[in-house]
Amino acid sequence: MMFSDTLRDEMKRKTVLMNYLHHTFRKHLVADDFFTVYQPIIDVDTGMLSHMESLVRWRGKEGMRASTAEIIPLLEESGLIRELGYFVFERVTADFRQIIDELGDSVPDLKITINVSLIQLLDSSFLRQITDIVTRYGLHPQQIIIEITETALMQQPEKMIRILNSMSERGFLFAIDDFGTGYSSLSYLKHLPAAYLKIDQSFVKDISFDERSQVIARSVIVLGKALGLKIIAEGVEDQETAHMVSRLGSDYLQGYFCSRPLPFAETLSLIRGRFRF
Ligand code: C2E
Ligand code: CA
Ligand code: CA
Ligand code: CA
């Protein structure tokens, strides 16, 4: 009884959300209903801001709120993620252009990362469209890192190698996201043109007190480094965790310990005021 009530409520919520989303896209209200936030990624060696991860946010409708983690799967299921993806790509590129214009000299190697779903990568015009956007804003593909989850890569491994290689030839960089949750093999990783490996938060979370998490994180770091990848530890929430992942050899830190994801205006003032964490 309880169970079926909950299930019915969930399905109702999903239907309502889906209706809102379809309405947004049909009426061309994407720019009104979605915005992007940015989370700093810190270089362990220098303590300086080196990258920012862009994350999309839904503004909500008529009192209804939903997290990005709830919204993204609905957009993927409906295919709307393709259109949202281009909106995000353009928004992030425009924001990044403004950062470079205002602060370029003080943050010369700053890079931005953009999350991309499998459906977006499988869109045959994806590479052309994102190349257009990047060119239009006078940026270089090398300034942009595309984050793809290990799980997405493993859906169609051979095809992904081809797609990523052609994008890599244009200069785009890749990060394998949520690494450790997707069961990819060493030989497969070797064939991917990725530059970064992001250790999933679930392994980072308990690292300061849980020995098993330490063992897993250490092997992921050793493996990644052996493949020539830079390691980003996500979900770093406190000093002890920051210390531990750094000691294990992570190149970069990301998480609430450094900063929460910030709206663009706050991102700008953060970069202006304080580069060292
Ligand atoms: P993700 O790519 O793994 O992003 C990291 C998530 O962890 C973000 O959640 C971020 O807000 C959260 N986070 C950051 N630091 C900490 C921390 O210290 N502790 C904890 N507990 N969480 C932390 P968010 O923004 O809700 O995004 C959820 C997922 O949605 C992302 O996971 C990503 O897979 C997807 N996503 C977000 N933006 C986009 C987008 O523009 N396009 C696509 N295709 N997917 C996106
Ligand atoms: Ca990500
Ligand atoms: Ca992640
Ligand atoms: Ca994730």
Image (spheres, helix red, strand yellow):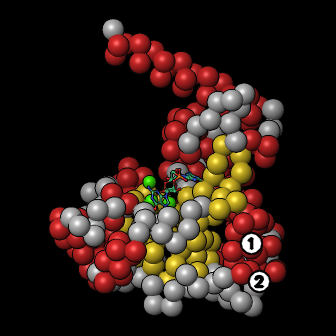
Kindly identify which numbered label has been placed on residue 268.
1
Tag 2: amino acid: Leu
Along the viewing direction, whichever of 83 and 232 lies nearer the viewer: 232
Question: Which residue is rendered at x = 41% and y = 13% of the image?
Answer: 5
Q: Are marks 2 and 1 in contact (CB under 8 Å)?
A: yes
Q: Earlier in the sequence, mark 2 or mark 1?
A: 2
Q: Residues within 10 Å of mark 1 (few under 14, many from 20)?
A: some
Tag 1: amino acid: Leu
Q: Position of residue 148 (x, y in %)?
A: 48, 60
Question: Which residue is rendered at x = 52% and y = 72% of the image?
Answer: 258
Image height of 101 relative to 267, above or below: below
Q: Is the CB–ligand 1 distance for label 2 below 8 Å?
A: no
Q: Is residue 59 visible?
A: yes
Q: Position of residue 136 (x, y in %)?
A: 81, 69
Q: Which residue, given by chain and number where applicable, does mark 2 sit on?
A: 103
Q: Position of residue 209 (x, y in %)?
A: 23, 67
Question: Which residue is rendered at x = 51% and y = 44% of the image?
Answer: 69
